[in-house]
Amino acid sequence: MNRSGVSDVKFRTGDVGCGVSHYRSRVLAGYVVLFILLSISCAHAMSGREVYEKMHEVAVKAIDHEMAATMILFDKGGGTRNRTLISYGKKGEAEAYKGLVLFKTPPDLKDVGFLVHARTFADRDLWAYFPEFKKIRRIPTSSQDDSFFGSDFSYDDFGGPANLDDYSFKILREEILDGKPCFVVEVTPKIHRKYTRYVSWVAKDLWIYLKIEYYQEKELYREGAFSDVRVIDDIPTAFKGLMANMKTGHKTEFTIESVQYHTSFSDDLFTQRSLERAGK
């Protein structure tokens, strides 16, 4: 204590150095932790293939179903045609599954049907039945992208889960669509298809399409938009879909009126005989 009664305060150079060194160490440690967290995040970033594997899981869970739906076909001039249909599905062992679609209205399409038998995701048979001709027609693989009974959807759209090994996937970016975070994924077929690539908007955590674009080379050919997403029996389901043909100006609106999952139909429902008898 000095003569004025105030204690002398002595600073040691070592004390200051230790403080600065300790501060720097803490900052450096913070950067190391941040770097590790970023590295872990990057290491776990999803690939395009993983996004589609998530979608595939949802599609497989939805195979066992009964669904009633309506279709409205819009021509370029604004004219409309209405249709109603019912769809059934049955999951088999491993990758096997079966599906049946029957039109109920209008009268000229009543009991027209579509049947799918898949032994694996890569090996399936498709048939169409036309009561007017009393004939079942097999749909070749080369025609799976053709119009589904005059609509803007395709036979493939109703053919069940795809074989992921037939495609390559690349995430282009992430963005918000209709208020939902999405992965934007480019899909390129490894097999011959009508379309040379697809660009899809896949909703995170829901793992379903909100939008998909179909290209022939660089030209946009078809575009689908899906909305009114509801979770039914733990399965995210888009109750509305609009498919537009950019070439013709034609479009088709698809609306699910009712759907039930986890059904267990007999194999007898999914036969060519049942197809001819409209599911009876």
Image (cartoon, rainbow, N blue to C red):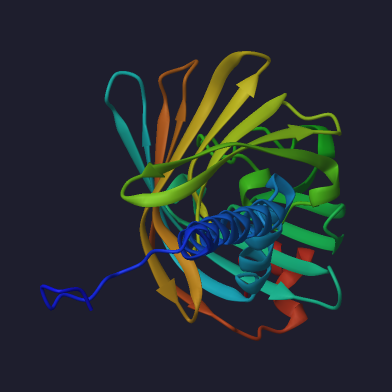
Q: Position of residue 6 (x, y in %)?
A: 15, 75
> Can residue 140 be seen?
no
Q: Quadrant of residue 5?
A: bottom left
Name of the residue lying farthest toward the left: 4
Q: Depth check: give the residue in front, 162 or 154.
A: 162
Q: Quadrant of residue 145?
A: top right
**Above or below, 102 relative to 213:** below
Rendered-image quadrant of the N terminus: bottom left
Rendered-image quadrant of the C terminus: bottom right
- Indicate left or right for 55 with 204 as reference: right
- Indicate left or right for 263 with 7 as reference: right
Residue in the image at 65% along x and 58% along y: 36
Residue in the image at 66% along x and 83% along y: 265
Residue in the image at 50% along x and 37% along y: 151
Residue in the image at 58% along x and 52% along y: 112
Q: Position of residue 172 (x, y in %)?
A: 60, 33
Name of the residue lying farthest toward the front: 3
Q: Position of residue 278 (x, y in %)?
A: 61, 65
Q: How many marks?
A: 0
Q: Position of residue 176 (x, y in %)?
A: 38, 44
**Above or below, 240 relative to 86:** above
Q: Depth check: give the residue in front, 118 or 180.
A: 180
**Above or below, 232 relative to 84:** below
Q: Depth check: give the residue in front, 128 or 169.
A: 169
> Can residue 196 be seen?
yes
- Indicate left or right for 263 with 191 as reference: left
Q: Depth check: give the residue in front, 26 or 20.
A: 20
